[in-house]
Amino acid sequence: MRLPSLSTMAEDYVKLIWKASERGGPGLATRDIAAALKVSASTVSGNLKKLDRDGLIEHTPYHGVVLTPLGHQVAVAMVRRHRLIETFLVERLGYSWDEVHTEAEALEHAVSERFLDRVDADLGHPTHDPHGDPIPGADGVVPDSPGTLLGAIQPGACGTVDRVSDDDPSLLRYFDELGVGLGTHLRVERVRDYAGVIAVARRSADGSESLVDLPAAAASAIWLAPDGD
């Protein structure tokens, strides 16, 4: 997918807006974008006006931001770049899954389409990155991801972790400590709102189970693919 020549700011904004909708969240308000990108609300407002003028978004004050078809195309292409680079860093350079997000954020703006196509071919055209996020194809088609956010799953339901948010490296490291990663089978036991944790039963390779208390942040960071039965 060939990108138009855009600023780093424009690429970051449209990618952020697209990811919010991909993960099932509400539309982003100015304050949400400011918090995510660590800039002032006034800076965001000014940049949104530029993106609206350039035909990348439709922004109605107090009503959120929507990508135009052009903005959607750019966003999907940037997500493809990001997730392919993360996969390359893990598969070929030995990075761990908590180390790649920041590196990919920088590299995604710098690499050429030729380089990206060769990375894709070298990796065997992967469909998902090290966090389970679907990698859009060169044609812009996004592979299906069957998982449901942990926070939307009722106690007693089971599934396998098929996707984990890469937004917070410290949370990924904590999941490692708990033994929770892609492919881990979990059963939701109960939600302890008063303690800020979700109690789950984790199944080990030998079939045994152990109880694990996941932090409340896991509710919006882990997707479970439901069991076949």
Image (tube, rainbow, N blue to C red):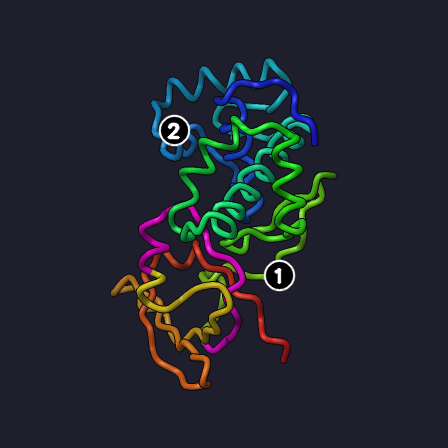
Classify mark 2: residues with Cα within 10 Å, few (<14), some (14-19) or many (20+). some
Nearest to the observer: residue 95 or residue 41: 95
User: Which region is colored magenta?
Assistant: 156-174
Q: Which residue is mark 2?
A: 34
* Residue 83 horizontal side relative to residue 114, left or right: left
| Residue found 47% across the figure and 78% down from its top | 156
Specify whether residue 16 is painted magenta: no
CA distance separating discs 2 and 1: 30 Å
- Where 227 falls versus 16 (above or below)? below
| Quadrant of the image occupied by residue 196 | bottom left
The amino acid on which the numbered mark 2 sits, given as a three-letter code, is Ala
- Where 216 falls versus 83 (above or below)? below
Specify whether residue 161 is painted magenta: yes
In percent of width and height, residue 76 lies at 63, 36
| Quadrant of the image occupied by residue 187 | bottom left
- Where 205 falls versus 150 (above or below)? below
| Quadrant of the image occupied by residue 38 | top left
Q: Which residue is mark 1?
A: 146
Nearest to the observer: residue 88 or residue 23: 88
The first of marks 2 and 1 along the sequence is 2
- Where 96 falls versus 177 (above or below)? above
Classify mark 1: residues with Cα within 10 Å, few (<14), some (14-19) or many (20+). few
Nearest to the observer: residue 118 or residue 184: 118
Which quadrant of the rendered structure holds the C terminus? bottom right
| Residue found 48% across the figure and 32% down from its top | 107
